Amino acid sequence: MTRFNDLYSEADTFLHRLDPRVKMASVLMLSLLAFIMSSLAYLLVLLTFIFILLLLARSSYRKTAFAMKFVLRFMALIAILWPLFDPSGTPVLIRLGPVVITEPGIWRGLTSAIRVGCLATVWYILIFTTSQRDLVRGLVKLGLRFDFGLALAIALRYFPAFGTVMDSIIDAQRSRGMEFEKGNIFARARKYVAVLGPAIVSALKTADMLALAMQSRAYGARRNRTYLRELRMRLSDYVALATVLAMFVVPAVAKYVLSVPI
Amino acid sequence: MNAVVTAQRLPVISLQDVSFSYEGGIEALKRVSLRVAKGEKVAVVGGNGSGKTTLAKHLNGLLKPSSGKVLIGGQDSSRTSVATLARTVGYVFQNPDYQLFCTSVEEEVRFGPHSMGLGRDDESALVERSMKLMGIGHLREQSPISLSLGDRRKVAIASVLATSPEVFVLDEPTTGLDTVESAQLMATLDVLRSEGMTVVLITHEMRLVAQHMDRVIAMSEGSVAFDTEVEEAFSDSDRLRRCKLLAPPITVLAQRLRAQGALSKGAATPLQLVEQVVRVRGERR
């Protein structure tokens, strides 16, 4: 399977240039908007808008394909399974023993699939256009303690390396005759003890060595931190934030204050 | 072992025009063909990124060739599971921590033969022999992860040895071992070889190659740069440099003595150098 160290794609688009705090707030609002909307038509409009943003993000084709493959498969799964497990409403379209498929069930399945598509895609856009460093810097600027931000940044950076270690451990156990593909689900799960044990030991050793290496380079010697690049909101950031805020507030007011069915 | 002699004997491993590319298109092996005969001691050497480990992972089917064919004990690696091939080829990883997960050393060493479904008596005999060969019998009750790097490496080697493979592939096994432990490990490999086991050693330590191996396969940019017996391997310093290798000091000394007419032949080990000096002195008298 294709594995990427980081889904972030370097590019010079307005989405890349946006302040990470604006992007995080926008993604949060667009996600909530997908939950507020219950009309299939409006959700389709939102999905189209998000897909246009995805195109504008100019992420690499391979990374986009990798991410969207999961999103589209998950959407299809929801659209197919929802009507099978939600037989409420009429008219009944198919009745096969205990399986009852109704027309409202199908619409609800499609609505939920598109809602999940909106949610997943908008978060992928954030990851495609914001480097891990900027994400953490944004979170620290929003009030996260620097130590926690640094821990998060290191965890994100080591995540792919940990995947490589897992692959090596699996190879090492396969070389000793272990067949991970054989046996029932419980037998297979038991076999993964042989992978998780060395993986946890390896992760703890790496963390321990990293902590020692950071301490030996005077980490924590100064309480007041300064930053090489300070995050500053620009006019374009305020415009983007105001636009998304309007996109969120108007439908929310329409639905919950004016009772417009959207 | 002469490469011509190897070609005539029945190969236990045979690579035919093997190429391999990792995802992303990096071509790590380029049309590699070689044969390893039963009982050979082969060193695979080369600079970092030359394709040594990629080549070694083809020897037990962990990697399947993008093109070409790998035959292990007569079985096509592309059509055979790693678990099946593990009965023929034992592979010791560079980092012993990738293998160790059991609560005691004995349990760790027993894991391989137990997975293969050998009888309890055979299993115990193999475990005892492997622990004895690696000198870790006194550690049997201890947790592998609490041991020193050198001892963890010995446990990892013993745990693969216990599967009783025909071919033993070791990826830089002397890393983290002190001089005495390295010498003990190489002596153990000599014992295994004398019992008919084929040994493939991936290493950067040319001194060990010169002293303990029969044949050298040098990798460079994914291809076999040269495949020859040890003495010849270290005779061409320009060729070695191109492969990011350096001859061991004894060989360099012998080459310089030879250049000054003090020796008639080169030498790869201290013993060979002494023999050369004694012979030349005898001839001059």
Image (cartoon, grey):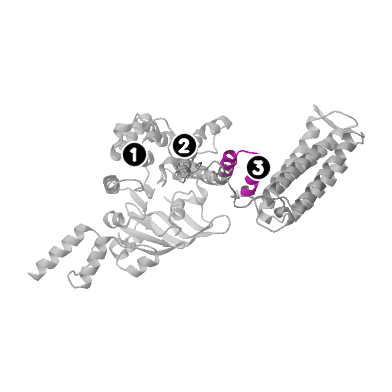
Which chain does the numbered disc 2 sit on? A
First reached walking from the N terminus: tag 2 or tag 3: 3
Reply yes or no: does residue A142 show up in magenta: yes
Chain where mark 1 sits: B
Horizontal side of residue B8 vs A63, given as left or right = left
Using residue A84 as the reference point, say whether residue B123 is left or right of it.
Answer: left
Residue B67 in percent (x, y) is at 53, 59
Q: Which residue is mark 2?
A: A201
Going by the numbered disc 3, the residue's amino acid type is Leu
Q: CA distance from mark 3 to mark 1?
A: 45 Å
Of circles 2 and 3, the one toward us is 3
* Label 3: element kind: helix
Give the side of residue B64 with respect to residue A107, left or right. Answer: left
Dot 3, how many residues are within 10 Å of its Cα: few (below 14), some (14-19), or many (20+)? Answer: some
Magenta stretch, main secondary structure class: helix
Residue ID for mark 3: A139
Q: Label 1: which residue?
A: B151
- Give the CA separation, mark 2 to mark 3: 30 Å
